[in-house]
Amino acid sequence: MRSYVARIAIFIGPLIWIMARPGAALATQTHGGAEGLIAHQLAHLFYLVSMGVFIYWLRKRRLVAESGWRMIQFAAAFLIIWNFDTFFVHLLDETPGIIRTYRLSPWTIRIETEPGFEALASIYYLAKLDHLFCVPALWLLYIGLKRLSSGNLKAGGDVP
Amino acid sequence: MTVSFAPIWAVDVIGSILMIVLSILCFRLARQLKRREADNIMWTYLVWICSALTIFAVSRSAGHILKQILLLTGSPHLWASISPFSGAVNTFTFILVGGLTLFFERTWDINQEVIQDRRSLQNAHSELLYLNENLERLVTERTEELALSEQKYRGIFEASRDMILVTAPNGRVVEMNPAGYQMLGFQSLKNENGEANSRDFFSSPKDCEGILSSINAKGFVSNIEMDLKHTDERRIRSLISGSLDQGAAERDSTIHFLVKDIEERRRIEEQIAQADKLASIGQLSAGIAHEINNPLGVMLGYTQLLIRQTKEGSETFQDLKTIEKHVRNCKTIVEDLLHFARTSPPKETTIRIDAAMDDVLNFVRQHAEMERMQIIREYDPSVLEMRLDEKKMKQVFMNLIMNARHAIGETGILTINTAYNPEGKSVEIRISDNGHGIDKQNLSRIFDPFFTTKPTGEGTGLGLSVSYGIVKNHGGDIRVESIPGEGSTFAIILPVVPPNISDESKIDGKIAADR
């Protein structure tokens, strides 16, 4: 009986000690500042890597010999480029002191850089045209699916 | 750097619209593929990917369009409040598309396995369906094929002129074809134990043991000459080949024998060899006889001349008489040798065989104490008159009957029968006795000149030789069958020659028969 009481005391004692000494609550982490940006950038990187892995498997399985999958491979490659581009633009936009943009009128903007980095303004301007990469990506995906569809129709199903 | 905002705006807005349109088109295409093959996991996967891309495109493009509109309409503060939500949705769609893409490899593998399994199932299903629809026909066809095959091989087995025997490795008889039954004289193979053993077929069971052990060791034996045993104890010389047929289990193994009866062939070969031997001896004898005959004639002539000049009763007269007697004996032997060698052509007259045989029997009865001997005469009435040298044929009958009497002793049975064979156009005269028979080792020598089993002084050993020569000289043949202890049978086969046939053609026929 005495040993039973001793065991209860060993478990419950520390709990009572913690409850008797309250401090700041650390249970839930706050999400402020740059966390959203970092999450978004990591998502871009994840998207980029997954497209790279996708291309790797398409080539390893020799699916690229078929024109439909080859087009889808090109679509994945364009999405990789698009992810690079957008990652770069987000980096310039959100990193203080590198690029500053001002809207002078509804159809005119001014891009400022640190002295000696003027070329970066032109690169930034071009990089903002990211749809030049993601639209071809989706178009190639569409073509690829269409070819897979026609190939499947010819084969009477069972493809791939 | 001051630049126009229009290109960025145009690319952003038009690109966003195109993104929405293209993503929706991709989604539709993927849906169509999925509908076409609802159970194809790859199309399902592509629908997921396209769904994620559509969500990504719509949320991002809608956000961009809204942003441009709000900026142009001078409401940047409104966009500032919406922007975090749009960015968060975009982040979510990136992860969604990326995550789904990473499952491509596993989805592909699963799809390949599903396709393979489906093909296997389809093949199995097709086979089952085919078998189900055609089972009865297939069974019928197979049964017919088997029946035909069985009929074919059964035909070979049944119709074979050679013995085909199937035994277990220990010699137990499994099956034997009709030729085997006929060859060995069996009606049924089963003994008191209900089974037969191939050891019973061999003259010596050791031969069977040897063959079985060779087959079990080597797997086969080929063309081994062995003596088989007829049910009447007759020996059958045979050529045996056998091979082991390994069954699925050891107890299923069988030995297949092919046995060829070569008794007749061997007998003919022996007869040819015997004839060759006797022909050689005949040639030798004829040469010697010719050389001796003339000096004997001179000796006999001079002896008789001296006898006439010598006083009868004197000692010299007696000596000359002794010389004359022995010279005459020598001349008889020499003449017998010449008969054996067939140097003189037969002096043929038309005689009846049965009459000639009766004359000989009467003569022998009177002179050879045959009262206690039973003589059975079975003459075939269809045997007509024949052109034969009567004196010489009687000599043949005399020799054979005297030999039979000698073999029988005082009591016994002498059987004489004649038979006409219309197919072979020949007459067979059989002289049989139930005497002591002839030993196996002597059978091949009985026609040799000077061969005799009688004690010295009782026989010259020329009787059968002379008989052989006379029969051959008539274009016939003489054969002997004997079982030691049971008796012997001499068979004379004479060709039936029509009385009008010319002597020349008769001689030609005789030469051909000799060959």
Image (spheres, rainbow, N blue to C red):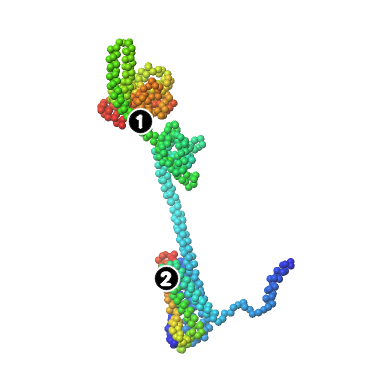
Q: Secondary structure at mark 2?
A: helix
* A131 or A89, nearer to the observer: A89
Residue B274 shows which numbered tag?
A: 1
Q: Where's the N terminus of chain B, which quadrant?
A: bottom left
Residue A92 visible in the displayed image: yes
Q: Residue at x 68, y 76 (%)?
A: A19
Residue A70 shows which numbered tag?
A: 2
Q: Position of residue B87 (x, y in %)?
A: 51, 79
* B454 relative to A91 in the view: left or right: left
Q: Residue at x 40, y 18 (%)?
A: B370
* B100 or B73, nearer to the observer: B100
Q: Where's the C terminus of chain B, which quadrant?
A: top left
Q: Position of residue B378 (x, y in %)?
A: 38, 23
Host chain of mark 2: A
Host chain of mark 1: B
Residue type at mark 2: give it.
Arg
Residue B129 visible in the displayed image: no
Q: Residue at x 41, y 34 (%)?
A: B236
Q: Position of residue B346 (x, y in %)?
A: 29, 24
Alpha-carbon neighbours of circle 2 within 10 Å: few (<14), some, or many (≥20)? Answer: many
